[in-house]
Image (spheres, rainbow, N blue to C red):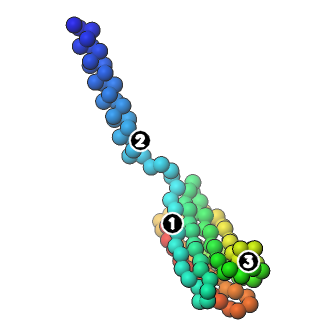
């Protein structure tokens, strides 16, 4: 009888430990990464998306402008907390997209990114901002 009681206590203790471990796993974040994105429209027929991903002390900023016009040249400028860190000319790809990705050091507190993209042919402008 003593062995049956010991087994029951062992099973109950094991079940309790497993339940406690499950709670601990659920409470932990799946990843240390934080992601945000924002979409908008430009002054013409184009659309834009600004994505930010914060991970391991870095913030990756990605600007995507969908123009649906192949071979157009765009100037893309990106600011981080008010300081311009990217100013490039890019040509739209075969899908009519312009993509610019840059990585910055994650600063203490909120990081705010903004961009401005201008079609060098017709002057269409896309602007957006996002904080993470």
Whether the residues at callouts 2 and 1 have beta carbons within 8 Å, the answer is: no
Distance Cα–Cα, label 2 vs label 1: 24 Å
Badge 3 marks a residue whose secondary structure is loop
Say if residue 15 shows up in the picture.
yes
Q: What residue is pinned by disc 1?
A: 36
Q: Is residue 83 visible?
A: no
Residue 72 image offset from top left, x and y in percent:
75, 83
- Residue at (51%, 52%) from the top-left corner? 32
- Label 3–label 1 contact, CB within 8 A: no
Residue displayed at 47% across by 65% down? 109
- Which residue is situated farthest in the left direction here? 1
The tag on residue 73 is none
User: Mark 2 near mark 3, Cβ–Cβ under 8 Å?
Assistant: no
Distance between the alpha carbons at the discs numbered 2 and 3: 45 Å
Give residue 1's quadrant in the image.
Answer: top left
Looking at the rendered image, the disc whose residue lies closer to the viewer, 2 or 3, is 3
Along the line of sight, which residue is nearer the eye, 48 or 127?
A: 48
Name the residue nearer the viewer: 57 or 92: 92
In primary-sequence order, the first of circles 2 and 1 is: 2
Q: Residues within 10 Å of mark 2 (few under 14, many from 20)?
A: few
Relative to 25, residue 52 above or below? below
Nearer the viewer's eye, disc 3 or disc 1?
Answer: 3
| Residue ID at (67%, 86%) | 118
How packed mark 3 is, by other alpha carbons closer than 10 Å (few <14, some 14-19, many 20 or more), is many
Residue where numbered disc 3 is placed: 92
Q: Position of residue 61 (x, y in %)?
A: 61, 68
Residue 9, compared with residue 34, is above or below; it is above
Of mark 2 and mark 3, the one earlier in the sequence is 2
Query: In this view of the protein, which residue sits in the foreground, 105 or 59?
Result: 59
Residue beneath label 2, please? 25
> Where does residue 83 sit, x and y in percent of width and height?
61, 77
């Amino acid at each position: 009888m003593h062995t049956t009681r010991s087994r029951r206590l062992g099973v109950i203790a094991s079940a309790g430990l497993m339940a406690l471990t499950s709670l601990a796993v659920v409470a932990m974040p799946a990843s240390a990464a934080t992601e945000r994105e924002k979409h908008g429209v430009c002054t013409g027929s184009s659309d834009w998306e600004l994505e930010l991903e914060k991970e391991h002390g870095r913030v990756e900023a990605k600007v995507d402008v969908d123009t649906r016009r192949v071979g157009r040249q765009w100037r893309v400028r990106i600011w981080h907390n008010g300081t311009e860190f990217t100013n490039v000319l890019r040509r739209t790809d075969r899908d009519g997209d312009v993509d610019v990705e840059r990585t910055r050091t994650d600063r203490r507190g909120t990081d705010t990114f903004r961009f401005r993209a201008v079609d060098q042919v017709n002057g269409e402008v896309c602007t957006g901002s996002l904080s993470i």
